Image (tube, grey):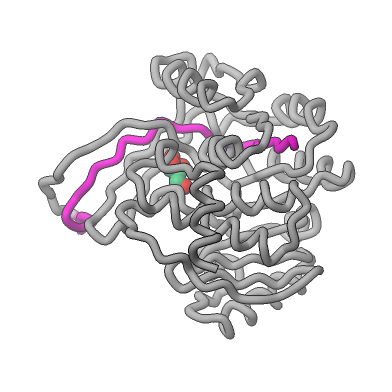
Amino acid sequence: MKIVVFGSINMDLTAYVPKLPLPGETLLGASYITVPGGKGNNQAVASARLGAQVLFVGRVGDDIFGKQVLKIVAAEHVDVSQVAVDKEKGTGLAVISVDQNAENAITVISGANWALDASDVARTEKCLDGAKALLLQLEVPMEASLQIAEIAKQKGVKVIFDPAPAVPLPERAYHGIDFITPNETETEILVGLRPQNEKEAAEAASILHQRGVENVIIKMGSKGVYYDTVDSRGFIKPYKVKSIDSVAAGDAFNAGLAVAISEGLPIAEAVRWGAAAGAIATTRKGALPAMPYREELLKLISEQQ
Ligand code: RIB
């Protein structure tokens, strides 16, 4: 079952700190890691670990980080043949702090990710045959994402759009996608309401429906997940795990959702896959290394029905 991911790939430099720094503050951290990340890449690797055949389309720079991330991602059985090497921009870099409550703050230097354009869209279009889902995020230019979304939707490929990092979306965006999956802060940027519970998430979802997207899934982290789709509507409580690092949990969620939808599972079950994938990602450090495997996801779902 084939999934195409169009999006960002970064090198993540993650520092583990007692608390997130205040403006002007210098903190002494405990440790750091340097691992591949980027929302697109994380979704690609998680989808592959969960059982999909994954093609990733993106850009890296002609530099040491680009070579390192591609080698590691290829070893995860992600097809990186359509990742272009940009001669002008460097590989994307994310500078991340993670505190003792597993919360994070991220600064992204987009580099080559921000150079994705019509040529990348054309390359992706040629690869969509046979794909069940296209995963998009917002760490690459919006125009390129919307172009490929519209092409994929016309071809019947399910477009799962993660509005992260969030910016207000043009009306066209809501019509060109099948699923939108904001978290609480992204929901607030999109609709002006930060949902804290099922009722508030339902309100936000109805605004998003009115804008033209049929399937809305609102990820509220430790407060659960609300979904309101063409097929069904409901709320899923969070899985109980020992969280140490929430980086890329949202990416893991989208991969779990996409793999389950691509396998034809009912939407409630697909949302459970997303929630379980996100929960597992919080139990390990870093972005790519934390992405969930299929066996552990199925185990968590069967243990906590
Ligand atoms: O969603 C987590 C990701 O956001 C990190 O891997 C980092 O690269 C940033 O893109």
User: Which residues make up the magenta segment?
Assistant: 1-23
| 297 up-or-down from 198: above or below | above
Q: Quadrant of the C terminus?
A: bottom right
Q: Depth check: 176 or 101 in front?
A: 101
Residue at 30% of width from left, 57% of height from top?
102
Residue at 39% of width from left, 15% of height from top?
64
Based on the displayed image, in which of its 4 quarters is residue 285 positioned?
top left
Q: Residue 198 location, x and y as percent? A: 56, 81
| 222 up-or-down from 105: above or below | below
Left or right: residue 98 compared with residue 199 = left
Left or right: residue 250 compared with residue 82 = left
Residue 21 in sight = yes
| In magenta segment, residue 11 | yes
Based on the displayed image, in which of its 4 quarters is residue 166 positioned?
bottom right
Residue at 81% of width from left, 42% of height from top?
152
| In magenta segment, residue 6 | yes
Quarter of the image where ligand 1 sits = top left
Left or right: residue 160 compared with residue 298 = right
| 166 up-or-down from 144: above or below | below
